Amino acid sequence: MLIGAHVSPAGGLYRAIERGTALGARSIQIFNQSPRAWRPTAYTEEDFARFREARAASAIDGVLIHAVYLVNCASEDPDIRAKSIASLTQSLRVGDAIGANAVVLHSGSAKAGPVEPAIARAGEAFAAALAESDRCPLHLEDTAGSGGTLGRSFEELAALLAAGGGDPRLGVCLDSCHLLASGYEIRTPGALAGVIDDFDAAVGIDRLGSLHLNDSQTPLGSNRDRHANIGEGELGIEGARAFVNEPRFAGLCCVLETPGPDRSGPTAEEVALVMGLLRS
Ligand SMILES: [Zn+2]
Ligand SMILES: [Zn+2]
């Protein structure tokens, strides 16, 4: 498992590799632009080349891009929908240019409306963005299930993949905080194994592409998305140990998106703590 952390690309994409290296990470996740604005960051070929060189010279073997939070591929609003497809396409193209393992996406929200047509709209948008980009995989992240967010259950993730046409570039990113918050008991190796059996039955284990390891401030089934530092929430240190040692997770990128002690993100100590949980 490639344990790592979400880091900032501020000051240049290649700086994300430096920050990941400073944390002792084997993988990183970045936003390809400000996550709360539509305006894309304009990168040059030189930016991409510098990133690829830095990555090749580093111990970082996995790179994930997290799509912008504003993206809602399930929106009924034609303007939001068009902006969402353009933004997701841009993330995938940056992923192509830097050789990212995947773009991780929140599938979208049905808001107060019915779920089925929302899934169909989201799937069409995924297919459109995939058609406008070359290679980078797209991983749909499971959600905590708050509001009308799509992807709260394995059945819903399977429906989203199908709505996207089942493209081989489509996969899933499982977040430990979101799993727990959406009602999946994953805190012992046995319980987690059963949950991943269910994932395999509903989605197919070969679609599992990446992982987020976060503790949860709120309890099992709370449907609230509140990340906590590793070992400081409802998942607990034994839950984190079970997660990193699940045999079917071997080899995948597993990034921390924790608040950190001063809310500036995961620290080297936290990355080392998680690496120490891994049984070799
Ligand atoms: Zn996310
Ligand atoms: Zn996540």
Image (tube, grey):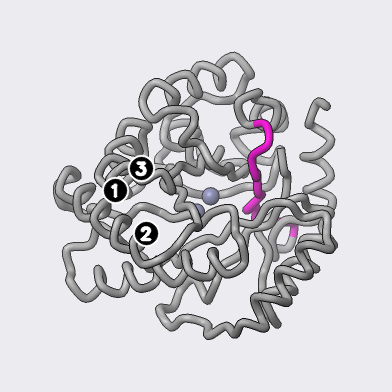
Q: Secondary structure at mark 2?
A: helix
Find out if the beta carbon at label 1 lies less than 8 Å from the nearest ligand 1 atom.
no
Q: Residues within 10 Å of mark 3 (few under 14, many from 20)?
A: many
Nearer the N terminus, badge 1 or badge 3? 3
Q: Residues within 10 Å of mark 2 (few under 14, many from 20)?
A: many
Q: Residue at x 57, y 49 (%)?
A: 227
Q: Is residue 246 visible?
A: yes
Q: Residue at x 56, y 18 (%)?
A: 193
Q: Secondary structure at mark 3?
A: loop
Q: Residue at x 25, y 45 (%)?
A: 163
Task: Determine which residue is flagged by label 3.
Answer: 151
Q: Is residue 255 magenta?
A: yes
Q: Amino acid type of disc 2?
A: Leu
- Place residue 98 in its image quadrant: bottom right
Q: Quadrant of the N terminus?
A: top right
Task: Determine which residue is flagged by label 1.
Answer: 164
Q: Is residue 10 left or right of residue 56?
A: left
Q: Nearer the viewer, residue 15 or 5?
A: 15
**Whether label 1 touches label 3, CB < 8 Å:** no
Q: Nearer the viewer, residue 166 or 275?
A: 166
Q: Residue furthest front?
A: 134
Q: Amino acid type of disc 3?
A: Gly
Numbered badge on residue 130? 2
Nearer the N terminus, badge 1 or badge 2? 2
Instruction: Please tell me whether mark 1 or mark 3 is closer to you in this view.
Output: 1
What is the x, y in percent for residue 122? 26, 54
Q: Which span is picked out in magenta?
A: 250-261
